[in-house]
Every structure is written in structure tokens, then in C-alpha cells.
């Protein structure tokens, strides 16, 4: 029976890990679809490179820092998976490592879309290596590796903070350091929407991510417990549905039309929001968490874009960073003692858990954002991180990789035609208005078109 249990647990966790790895395809499709055609190859290359770098760095150093024996702040054993036990809980070491490695790569992938269309490819690779080797593993040790947050009772079941907020804060540092894309803002500070080029591709990406999320959350139980993983699958689906529907209704009410890119992000907002408490809240609690997550993502995307002038190409900071915070704090509000992971949240008469969750959120933000910003500022000062202006106009595909994703559809020179005038009357993500294209015009009005 012990051998059978080990086999079933291993198969379940590995299948879940395969689903999490398949999420790379979802991120690639989503990010490519929400950005311009001239940068498609670059987006795809970054997503492929992230899993390659993440797997290697997490094997060499990341796992040891995150799960190795050490102190309450960092592990100092298990580099190259040496000097570690053959089993971790109910799993073989290698199965546990594989599952954690694809989680690590997920955190780094979040950065890719936010900084799209302007970061140098090699600098992105360096930053990815730092995230997967050091930044993610250290805070992960605090939360999951026997560190100080875990010791005080911090609950982040599948990583609203440990994975998503870490990636979101790294993305925020990237957006601040790089600055906005050319043409995103007019001289008077008004916003020019830069719509993505492929709505079907972006939608496919979200549906792939939704499927992968069941492995992301369900596999985090690290055993094939039928009651627990069924509960987790249910809360995951309900939060995603609630997030998508709340954004649909909100954009219809606020803008007069539904915004497809916002709705896609609403589904992801619900997923990120439920990730921390998926095993600790009721089904009704999951719906409320998803609804609030959807509302949060709409207003924070608008706030970052209009008020703070932070150009996040796909809304990653809001989806993963801010909704990760909300989902983590929500455990302290909606956690119930009858769930698979019992938590006495505010509605169950407990108050202390909310304080613990808040401490974890703040500590992780300080670490992830601070180290990411320091790394990027160092790269900017020494090597430069942003492509030259002419390369950005032409597109990163040809300039950085020597190939176009759509060579049969883009005529030579057209990618540099400036937009001389844009009149928009829609929400960010909706592209309504009149475009006048000419051989002359001011690049700082709306950049270039492909």
C-alpha cells in the first residue's frame, strides 16, 4: 500500500507539473496576442528561454536556497540536488524538484509581457537568471521552505504571493526602469492605446492558462487526496469564472462596451486571487474573491497607466502583483476551519491571520521589488537594458532575431510608417477611433504601426 500510494502521488504531481509547464504556451500566446505583430518572435523567444534558464538555475542553486537546510532566511544545502533526502514528504525528490522548478519559471515568465517591446533580449535573459536563481528562491524559502513566514503561520497555498506577486513586483521594477514604449503617451500626458495584434491568440493563451492552473493549484497539495484536490479544482474554477464575469459587467457599465483584453485579464485576476486560499476557503468565498479580483484588476490597470504613467504592455503588474496581494490577504478574511487547509479568517471569528498575511505581503514586496530594481538599475548603468529608438520603431523581431513572425503579410518599410493622428474614445485595450496614416508625422504621438 505504501508503494501504491507513492506511485499515485508521484503520477498526480508530475501530471500537475506537466500542466504547469504547459502554461508556458499560454503565457507565450497571451503576451504575443496582446502586443504588436513586429515583436511576436521576441515574445516567443523570451518565453522559451525562461523555462530553459529557470530549470537550470533552479537545479544548480535555486532549490538549495529555497528548500535546503539553513536558517529561517535562506537554505544552504541541496545545490545540484546533492546532500538531500531521496524523498520529500510523500514524493520522490526528483518529482518534488520538477514541480517546484516549473513554478520557479512561472514567476520569471510574468516579467516577459510587462516589459515587452522595448527590453534587450540578452538583458532579459540575465534578469531571468537572477530571478530564478536568487530572488524567487529566497522569498520562497520564507514561505514554503521552513522560513520565518511559514513559522509564524503565513498561508499561501499555491503562490499568490510566493509566485505571482514576486513576478509582478519584478515586472513593476522592469516597467519603471525601462520607461514607457515610444508613442504610449502624448506630450500632455494623455494615453494612446497600443492594441495587441491577435485577439484569438491571446484568448487561446488564457484558456491554456486556465487549464494549467488546475495543475498549478491542485498539484500543490503534493498528494492525490481526492477530497482535497476536488475542493481545490472547484474553488479555482469558480474564482476564474467570477473574475471574468465581473470584468465583463464592469467594463460594459463603465465604458459602454465590453473590453476583451480586460475580460481576459479578469479571468487571470480571479485565478491569481484564489491561488493562496484555494484550499482554505469555501466555494462561496472563492466566488467573492474572484469578483473582487476582477474589479481590482480593471481599476489598477487604469491607475498604473493613467496616473502613474507606468506602461505595462499586458497588465501583468495588476494581474499578478496586485491581485496576488488581494488573494493572500483574502485568506485572512475568508479562510474557514472546515476547508482542507483549516484557517480561521475574519468571517470565522479570527483576526490574527489577517495580520500575518499582511506581514507576508509587505515583506515579500520589499524583497522582490527591491532586489529586482537594484538588479535592473545595475544592468542599466553598466550594459543598458532598452533597445535603441530606431530598433523599437522597426520591431524587435527583425532587429534582435533577424526574422519576422509574419513574413508573408508585412511589406517592407511599412513597420516604420508613423501614425500622424489618433483619435480614441475607448478604454485601454479597446481600439476605436480614427487613424490617419501618412509618410510624415510625429513619432511621439502614437509611435509606429505594423
Image (cartoon, helix red, strand yellow):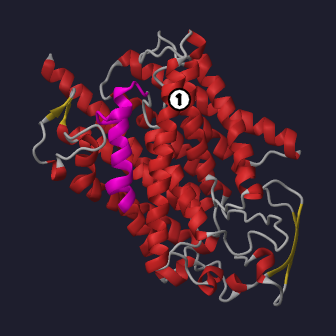
User: Label 1: which residue?
Assistant: 236
Locate residue 359 relative to residue 283 in the image: left or right: left
Quarter of the image where one finds residue 108: bottom left
Query: In this view of the protein, which residue sits in the foreground, 444 or 365?
Result: 365
Query: In this view of the protein, which residue sits in the foreground, 185 or 365?
Result: 365
Task: Give yes or no for residue 331 being in the magenta stretch.
Answer: no
Residue at x-position 58% and y-position 21%: 333
* 340 to 291, vertically: above or below: above
Locate residue 38 relative to residue 120 in the image: left or right: right
Residue 397, image x and y in percent? 54, 77
* 29 to 97, vertically: above or below: below
State how many labels appear: 1
Residue at x-position 24% and y-position 32%: 10
Q: Where the N terminus falls, by quadrant?
A: top left
Quarter of the image where one finds residue 329: top right
Locate residue 134 relative to residue 28 in the image: left or right: left
Residue at x-position 32% and y-position 56%: 133
Residue at x-position 29% and y-position 33%: 146
Task: Give yes or no for residue 146 being in the magenta stretch.
Answer: yes
Magenta segment, which residues? Answer: 130-154
Amino acid at each position: 500500500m505504501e508503494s501504491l500510494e507513492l506511485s499515485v502521488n508521484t503520477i498526480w504531481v508530475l501530471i500537475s507539473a506537466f500542466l504547469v509547464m504547459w502554461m508556458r504556451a499560454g503565457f507565450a500566446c497571451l503576451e504575443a496576442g496582446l502586443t504588436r505583430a513586429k515583436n511576436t518572435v521576441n515574445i516567443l523567444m523570451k518565453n522559451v528561454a525562461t523555462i530553459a534558464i529557470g530549470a537550470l538555475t533552479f537545479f544548480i542553486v535555486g532549490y538549495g536556497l529555497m528548500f535546503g537546510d539553513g536558517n529561517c532566511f535562506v537554505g544552504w544545502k541541496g545545490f545540484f540536488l546533492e546532500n538531500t533526502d531521496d524523498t520529500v514528504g510523500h514524493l520522490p525528490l526528483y518529482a518534488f524538484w520538477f514541480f517546484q522548478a516549473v513554478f520557479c519559471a512561472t514567476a520569471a515568465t510574468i516579467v516577459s509581457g510587462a516589459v515587452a517591446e522595448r527590453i534587450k533580449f540578452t538583458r532579459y535573459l540575465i534578469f531571468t537568471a537572477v530571478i530564478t536563481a536568487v530572488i524567487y528562491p529566497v522569498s520562497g524559502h520564507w514561505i514554503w521552505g521552513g522560513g520565518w513566514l511559514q513559522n509564524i503561520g503565513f498561508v499561501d497555498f499555491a503562490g499568490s504571493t510566493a509566485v505571482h506577486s514576486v513576478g509582478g513586483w519584478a515586472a513593476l521594477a522592469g516597467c519603471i526602469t525601462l520607461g514607457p514604449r515610444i508613442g504610449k503617451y502624448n506630450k500632455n500626458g494623455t494615453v494612446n492605446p497600443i492594441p495587441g495584434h491577435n485577439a484569438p491568440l491571446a484568448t487561446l493563451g488564457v484558456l491554456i492558462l486556465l487549464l494549467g492552473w488546475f495543475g498549478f493549484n491542485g498539484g500543490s497539495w503534493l498528494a492525490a487526496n481526492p477530497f482535497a484536490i476536488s475542493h481545490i479544482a472547484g474553488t479555482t474554477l469558480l474564482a476564474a469564472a467570477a473574475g471574468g464575469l465581473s470584468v465583463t459587467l464592469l467594463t460594459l457599465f463603465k465604458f459602454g462596451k465590453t473590453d476583451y483584453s480586460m475580460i481576459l485579464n479578469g479571468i487571470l485576476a480571479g485565478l491569481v486571487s484564489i491561488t493562496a486560499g484555494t484550499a482554505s476557503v469555501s466555494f462561496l468565498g472563492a466566488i467573492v474573491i474572484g469578483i473582487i479580483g476582477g474589479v481590482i484588476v480593471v481599476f489598477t490597470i487604469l491607475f498604473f497607466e493613467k496616473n502613474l504613467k507606468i506602461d505595462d504592455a499586458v497588465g501583468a503588474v495588476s494581474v499578478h502583483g496586485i491581485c496576488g496581494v488581494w488573494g493572500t490577504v483574502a485568506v485572512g478574511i475568508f479562510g474557514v476551519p472546515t476547508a482542507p487547509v483549516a484557517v480561521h479568517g475574519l468571517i470565522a471569528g479570527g483576526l490574527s491571520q489577517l495580520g500575518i498575511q499582511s506581514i507576508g505581503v509587505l515583506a515579500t514586496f520589499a524583497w522582490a521589488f527591491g532586489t529586482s530594481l537594484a538588479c535592473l538599475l545595475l544592468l542599466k548603468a553598466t550594459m543598458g537594458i532598452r533597445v535603441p529608438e530606431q530598433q523599437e520603431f522597426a520591431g524587435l523581431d527583425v532587429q534582435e532575431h533577424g526574422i519576422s513572425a509574419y513574413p508573408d503579410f508585412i511589406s517592407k518599410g511599412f513597420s516604420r510608417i508613423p501614425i500622424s493622428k489618433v483619435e480614441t474614445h475607448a478604454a485601454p485595450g479597446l481600439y476605436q477611433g480614427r487613424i490617419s496614416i501618412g509618410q510624415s508625422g510625429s513619432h511621439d504621438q502614437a509611435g509606429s504601426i505594423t
